[in-house]
Image (spheres, rainbow, N blue to C red):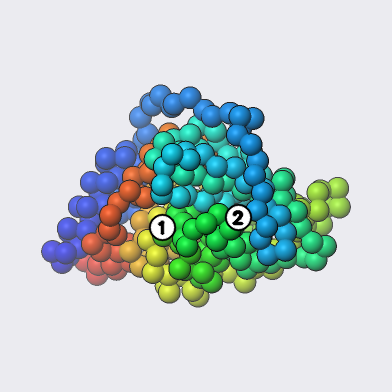
Amino acid sequence: MKIQTITAVTLVLALCLLFTCGCTTTTETKQLPAVTAPTAISYNDIPVQYAEVNGITIGYREFGVQNTEPLLMLVGFGETMNTWNATFINILAEDFHVYTYDHRGMGESTDVDAQYTIAQLGDDAAGLIIALGYDSMNIYGVSMGSTVSQQLLIDHPEKVRKAILSSATYSASIPETSLLHQLLEANAGDMSKPDGVRKEAVANLAWEGSYANLSEITNHVMLITGTADILTPPAVAIEMAGQIDGSWLIRFKDIPHVGSRYAPLEYGTITTTFLKLDESPEYSIRDILNSTKNAE
Protein backbone atom coordinates (compact mmCIF):
# COMPACT_ATOMS: atom_id res chain seq x y z
CA MET A 1 0.00 0.00 0.00
CA LYS A 2 1.33 3.41 -0.94
CA ILE A 3 2.13 5.99 1.71
CA GLN A 4 -0.57 8.35 0.49
CA THR A 5 -3.13 5.56 0.71
CA ILE A 6 -2.22 4.90 4.33
CA THR A 7 -2.66 8.60 4.99
CA ALA A 8 -6.07 8.59 3.34
CA VAL A 9 -7.19 5.49 5.18
CA THR A 10 -6.00 6.93 8.46
CA LEU A 11 -7.88 10.14 7.77
CA VAL A 12 -11.12 8.34 6.99
CA LEU A 13 -10.75 6.00 9.96
CA ALA A 14 -10.12 8.93 12.27
CA LEU A 15 -13.33 10.58 11.14
CA CYS A 16 -15.22 7.32 11.48
CA LEU A 17 -14.00 6.88 15.04
CA LEU A 18 -14.74 10.51 15.81
CA PHE A 19 -18.35 10.14 14.79
CA THR A 20 -18.58 6.49 15.95
CA CYS A 21 -19.97 5.23 12.67
CA GLY A 22 -18.58 2.79 10.10
CA CYS A 23 -17.08 3.54 6.70
CA THR A 24 -16.22 1.36 3.75
CA THR A 25 -12.57 1.27 4.75
CA THR A 26 -13.28 -0.47 8.06
CA THR A 27 -13.75 -4.18 8.64
CA GLU A 28 -16.64 -3.60 11.00
CA THR A 29 -19.24 -0.93 11.54
CA LYS A 30 -19.07 0.82 14.87
CA GLN A 31 -22.06 0.75 17.22
CA LEU A 32 -23.49 4.20 17.91
CA PRO A 33 -23.34 5.28 21.56
CA ALA A 34 -26.38 6.40 23.50
CA VAL A 35 -26.97 10.11 22.98
CA THR A 36 -29.49 12.70 24.13
CA ALA A 37 -31.16 14.54 21.29
CA PRO A 38 -32.17 18.21 21.52
CA THR A 39 -35.79 19.27 21.64
CA ALA A 40 -37.68 18.90 18.37
CA ILE A 41 -39.11 21.91 16.60
CA SER A 42 -42.85 22.31 16.01
CA TYR A 43 -43.87 22.60 12.38
CA ASN A 44 -47.10 24.25 13.45
CA ASP A 45 -45.06 27.25 14.60
CA ILE A 46 -43.40 27.73 11.20
CA PRO A 47 -45.61 29.23 8.46
CA VAL A 48 -45.63 27.80 4.96
CA GLN A 49 -44.39 30.21 2.30
CA TYR A 50 -44.74 29.96 -1.46
CA ALA A 51 -42.56 30.50 -4.52
CA GLU A 52 -43.44 30.45 -8.21
CA VAL A 53 -41.15 28.02 -10.03
CA ASN A 54 -41.41 26.54 -13.55
CA GLY A 55 -45.12 27.28 -13.87
CA ILE A 56 -46.10 25.80 -10.51
CA THR A 57 -46.29 27.01 -6.91
CA ILE A 58 -43.90 25.38 -4.43
CA GLY A 59 -44.67 25.44 -0.74
CA TYR A 60 -41.71 25.68 1.61
CA ARG A 61 -40.67 26.41 5.18
CA GLU A 62 -37.46 27.91 6.50
CA PHE A 63 -35.62 27.35 9.76
CA GLY A 64 -32.51 28.85 11.30
CA VAL A 65 -33.11 32.15 9.52
CA GLN A 66 -30.38 33.76 11.62
CA ASN A 67 -27.77 31.67 9.77
CA THR A 68 -26.28 32.63 6.42
CA GLU A 69 -25.25 29.25 4.92
CA PRO A 70 -28.26 27.73 3.09
CA LEU A 71 -29.31 24.08 3.09
CA LEU A 72 -32.10 22.77 0.86
CA MET A 73 -33.80 19.54 1.99
CA LEU A 74 -35.21 17.20 -0.68
CA VAL A 75 -37.76 14.81 0.76
CA GLY A 76 -38.36 11.20 -0.24
CA PHE A 77 -41.01 9.28 -2.16
CA GLY A 78 -44.61 9.82 -1.12
CA GLU A 79 -43.71 12.26 1.62
CA THR A 80 -44.01 15.97 2.32
CA MET A 81 -41.89 18.49 4.17
CA ASN A 82 -43.89 17.72 7.33
CA THR A 83 -42.44 14.20 7.46
CA TRP A 84 -38.86 15.30 8.13
CA ASN A 85 -37.79 14.29 11.63
CA ALA A 86 -38.26 17.50 13.61
CA THR A 87 -35.25 16.86 15.84
CA PHE A 88 -33.06 16.33 12.77
CA ILE A 89 -34.21 19.62 11.22
CA ASN A 90 -33.65 21.43 14.53
CA ILE A 91 -30.05 20.20 14.71
CA LEU A 92 -29.34 21.39 11.17
CA ALA A 93 -31.02 24.75 11.84
CA GLU A 94 -28.55 25.44 14.65
CA ASP A 95 -25.87 26.13 12.02
CA PHE A 96 -27.66 26.50 8.69
CA HIS A 97 -30.54 28.38 7.10
CA VAL A 98 -32.62 25.30 6.33
CA TYR A 99 -35.32 25.16 3.68
CA THR A 100 -37.76 22.26 3.40
CA TYR A 101 -40.25 22.04 0.55
CA ASP A 102 -42.81 19.81 -1.15
CA HIS A 103 -42.18 18.34 -4.59
CA ARG A 104 -44.69 19.35 -7.24
CA GLY A 105 -48.10 17.78 -6.72
CA MET A 106 -47.38 16.95 -3.08
CA GLY A 107 -48.50 18.72 0.09
CA GLU A 108 -48.46 22.49 -0.38
CA SER A 109 -47.08 22.45 -3.94
CA THR A 110 -49.21 22.55 -7.08
CA ASP A 111 -48.79 20.62 -10.32
CA VAL A 112 -49.96 20.49 -13.90
CA ASP A 113 -51.94 17.63 -15.43
CA ALA A 114 -49.05 16.05 -17.35
CA GLN A 115 -46.74 13.38 -15.97
CA TYR A 116 -43.37 14.81 -14.97
CA THR A 117 -39.86 13.34 -14.84
CA ILE A 118 -37.04 13.19 -12.30
CA ALA A 119 -35.22 15.73 -14.46
CA GLN A 120 -38.15 18.12 -14.05
CA LEU A 121 -38.01 17.69 -10.28
CA GLY A 122 -34.32 18.56 -10.48
CA ASP A 123 -35.22 21.64 -12.51
CA ASP A 124 -37.76 22.56 -9.82
CA ALA A 125 -35.06 22.38 -7.16
CA ALA A 126 -32.75 24.56 -9.25
CA GLY A 127 -35.55 27.02 -9.86
CA LEU A 128 -36.43 27.15 -6.16
CA ILE A 129 -32.82 27.94 -5.28
CA ILE A 130 -32.99 30.94 -7.61
CA ALA A 131 -36.46 31.97 -6.38
CA LEU A 132 -35.17 31.99 -2.80
CA GLY A 133 -32.46 34.44 -3.80
CA TYR A 134 -29.41 32.20 -4.02
CA ASP A 135 -26.97 31.35 -6.76
CA SER A 136 -26.31 27.96 -5.12
CA MET A 137 -27.10 25.97 -1.96
CA ASN A 138 -25.98 22.97 -0.01
CA ILE A 139 -28.47 20.13 -0.54
CA TYR A 140 -29.58 17.09 1.46
CA GLY A 141 -31.62 14.50 -0.42
CA VAL A 142 -33.08 11.35 1.08
CA SER A 143 -34.44 8.33 -0.83
CA MET A 144 -36.23 9.77 -3.89
CA GLY A 145 -34.89 13.14 -2.77
CA SER A 146 -31.39 11.78 -3.28
CA THR A 147 -32.40 10.72 -6.80
CA VAL A 148 -33.55 14.27 -7.54
CA SER A 149 -30.34 15.54 -5.94
CA GLN A 150 -28.26 13.41 -8.29
CA GLN A 151 -30.14 14.83 -11.27
CA LEU A 152 -29.60 18.32 -9.89
CA LEU A 153 -25.87 17.61 -9.60
CA ILE A 154 -25.79 16.35 -13.19
CA ASP A 155 -27.96 19.01 -14.85
CA HIS A 156 -27.25 22.03 -12.63
CA PRO A 157 -23.91 21.44 -10.86
CA GLU A 158 -23.37 25.17 -10.44
CA LYS A 159 -26.42 25.33 -8.15
CA VAL A 160 -24.92 22.93 -5.60
CA ARG A 161 -22.25 23.77 -3.03
CA LYS A 162 -22.11 20.45 -1.15
CA ALA A 163 -24.47 17.50 -1.40
CA ILE A 164 -25.53 14.78 1.02
CA LEU A 165 -27.17 11.72 -0.56
CA SER A 166 -28.95 9.60 2.06
CA SER A 167 -30.55 6.21 1.31
CA ALA A 168 -29.53 6.64 -2.30
CA THR A 169 -29.46 4.52 -5.42
CA TYR A 170 -28.33 5.29 -8.95
CA SER A 171 -31.35 3.37 -10.31
CA ALA A 172 -34.54 1.77 -9.05
CA SER A 173 -34.23 -0.93 -11.72
CA ILE A 174 -31.13 -2.82 -10.59
CA PRO A 175 -31.22 -6.20 -8.80
CA GLU A 176 -30.13 -4.67 -5.48
CA THR A 177 -33.22 -2.44 -5.39
CA SER A 178 -35.82 -5.03 -6.40
CA LEU A 179 -37.94 -4.33 -3.30
CA LEU A 180 -37.93 -0.63 -4.06
CA HIS A 181 -38.92 -1.36 -7.66
CA GLN A 182 -41.84 -3.50 -6.47
CA LEU A 183 -42.96 -0.72 -4.12
CA LEU A 184 -42.88 1.85 -6.92
CA GLU A 185 -44.77 -0.42 -9.32
CA ALA A 186 -47.45 -1.07 -6.71
CA ASN A 187 -47.97 2.65 -6.10
CA ALA A 188 -47.86 3.58 -9.79
CA GLY A 189 -50.71 1.20 -10.57
CA ASP A 190 -52.83 1.86 -7.47
CA MET A 191 -55.62 4.26 -8.47
CA SER A 192 -56.56 4.69 -4.80
CA LYS A 193 -53.27 6.52 -4.20
CA PRO A 194 -53.12 10.31 -4.52
CA ASP A 195 -52.15 11.59 -7.97
CA GLY A 196 -48.93 13.04 -6.58
CA VAL A 197 -47.78 9.70 -5.19
CA ARG A 198 -48.58 7.85 -8.41
CA LYS A 199 -46.75 10.45 -10.49
CA GLU A 200 -43.68 10.20 -8.25
CA ALA A 201 -43.72 6.41 -8.66
CA VAL A 202 -43.99 6.66 -12.46
CA ALA A 203 -41.18 9.23 -12.60
CA ASN A 204 -38.89 6.99 -10.54
CA LEU A 205 -39.63 3.94 -12.68
CA ALA A 206 -38.98 5.90 -15.89
CA TRP A 207 -35.71 7.39 -14.63
CA GLU A 208 -32.80 6.01 -16.66
CA GLY A 209 -30.44 6.27 -13.72
CA SER A 210 -27.29 8.24 -12.99
CA TYR A 211 -24.50 5.64 -13.01
CA ALA A 212 -22.99 6.78 -16.30
CA ASN A 213 -22.77 10.35 -14.98
CA LEU A 214 -21.56 9.79 -11.43
CA SER A 215 -17.89 9.96 -12.37
CA GLU A 216 -18.48 13.41 -13.87
CA ILE A 217 -19.69 14.91 -10.58
CA THR A 218 -17.08 17.27 -9.18
CA ASN A 219 -19.09 18.76 -6.30
CA HIS A 220 -18.32 17.76 -2.71
CA VAL A 221 -20.59 14.78 -1.95
CA MET A 222 -21.22 12.60 1.09
CA LEU A 223 -23.30 9.41 0.94
CA ILE A 224 -25.00 8.12 4.09
CA THR A 225 -26.45 4.62 4.36
CA GLY A 226 -27.72 2.26 7.04
CA THR A 227 -26.71 -1.38 7.19
CA ALA A 228 -30.36 -2.40 7.68
CA ASP A 229 -31.63 -0.56 4.60
CA ILE A 230 -33.41 -3.12 2.41
CA LEU A 231 -34.78 -0.65 -0.15
CA THR A 232 -31.47 0.99 -1.08
CA PRO A 233 -28.88 -1.43 0.37
CA PRO A 234 -25.43 -0.24 1.50
CA ALA A 235 -23.77 -2.07 -1.38
CA VAL A 236 -25.32 0.47 -3.76
CA ALA A 237 -23.97 3.42 -1.77
CA ILE A 238 -20.52 1.83 -1.74
CA GLU A 239 -20.66 1.45 -5.51
CA MET A 240 -21.75 5.06 -5.94
CA ALA A 241 -18.99 6.34 -3.66
CA GLY A 242 -16.49 4.52 -5.81
CA GLN A 243 -17.69 6.48 -8.83
CA ILE A 244 -17.92 9.98 -7.34
CA ASP A 245 -14.40 11.28 -7.01
CA GLY A 246 -13.59 12.72 -3.58
CA SER A 247 -16.86 11.53 -2.05
CA TRP A 248 -17.37 10.46 1.54
CA LEU A 249 -19.29 7.35 2.58
CA ILE A 250 -20.76 6.86 6.06
CA ARG A 251 -22.46 3.63 7.19
CA PHE A 252 -24.60 3.47 10.32
CA LYS A 253 -25.01 0.08 11.95
CA ASP A 254 -28.53 -1.41 12.10
CA ILE A 255 -30.17 1.74 10.69
CA PRO A 256 -32.88 1.21 8.03
CA HIS A 257 -34.05 3.33 5.10
CA VAL A 258 -34.28 7.09 5.79
CA GLY A 259 -31.93 6.84 8.75
CA SER A 260 -32.43 10.43 9.94
CA ARG A 261 -35.83 9.27 11.16
CA TYR A 262 -34.23 6.75 13.53
CA ALA A 263 -30.95 8.44 14.47
CA PRO A 264 -31.58 12.18 14.07
CA LEU A 265 -28.75 13.34 16.31
CA GLU A 266 -26.13 11.14 14.63
CA TYR A 267 -27.31 12.06 11.14
CA GLY A 268 -27.51 15.72 12.07
CA THR A 269 -24.01 15.69 13.57
CA ILE A 270 -22.31 14.02 10.60
CA THR A 271 -24.19 16.25 8.14
CA THR A 272 -23.24 19.43 9.99
CA THR A 273 -19.61 18.35 10.26
CA PHE A 274 -19.34 17.51 6.55
CA LEU A 275 -20.92 20.78 5.50
CA LYS A 276 -18.54 22.74 7.71
CA LEU A 277 -15.41 21.13 6.24
CA ASP A 278 -13.37 23.66 4.30
CA GLU A 279 -11.96 21.19 1.79
CA SER A 280 -12.54 17.72 0.40
CA PRO A 281 -10.55 14.66 1.55
CA GLU A 282 -6.96 14.49 0.31
CA TYR A 283 -7.78 11.24 -1.47
CA SER A 284 -11.06 9.90 -2.73
CA ILE A 285 -12.93 6.76 -1.76
CA ARG A 286 -12.13 5.41 -5.24
CA ASP A 287 -8.39 5.84 -4.60
CA ILE A 288 -8.69 4.05 -1.28
CA LEU A 289 -10.68 1.14 -2.70
CA ASN A 290 -8.36 0.75 -5.70
CA SER A 291 -5.21 0.92 -3.60
CA THR A 292 -6.64 -1.57 -1.12
CA LYS A 293 -7.34 -3.99 -3.95
CA ASN A 294 -3.83 -3.53 -5.30
CA ALA A 295 -2.33 -4.27 -1.90
CA GLU A 296 -4.22 -7.56 -1.51
Tell me which corner region of the image, top left, top right, bottom left or bottom right, holds residue 53: bottom right
Disc 2, SS = helix
Q: How many numbered discs?
A: 2
Where does the image place residue 22, in percent across and percent down from the top left? 35, 45
Please name whichever residue, 132 or 247, is drawn nearer the observer in this view of the structure: 132
Residue at image position (77%, 65%) is 115
Where does the image place residue 225, in percent across and percent down from the top left? 46, 49
Answer left or right for 192 relative to 142.
Answer: right
Residue at image position (43%, 27%) is 37
Q: Name the residue under label 1.
A: 162
Q: Name the residue under label 2.
A: 144
Please name whichever residue, 198 or 24, is drawn nearer the observer in this view of the structure: 198
Residue type indicated by callout 1: Lys
Please name whichever residue, 148 or 124, is drawn nearer the observer in this view of the structure: 124
Where does the image place residue 17, in percent across and percent down from the top left? 27, 41
User: In this rendering, which labeled residue sits more in front, label 1 or label 2?
Assistant: 1
Check disc 1: other Cα within 10 Å, few if <14, some if 14-19, many if 20+.
many
- Which quadrant of the rendered structure holds the N terminus? bottom left
**C-alpha distance separating marks 1 and 2:** 18 Å
Answer left or right for 251 relative to 170.
Answer: left
- Which quadrant of the rendered structure holds the C terminus? bottom left
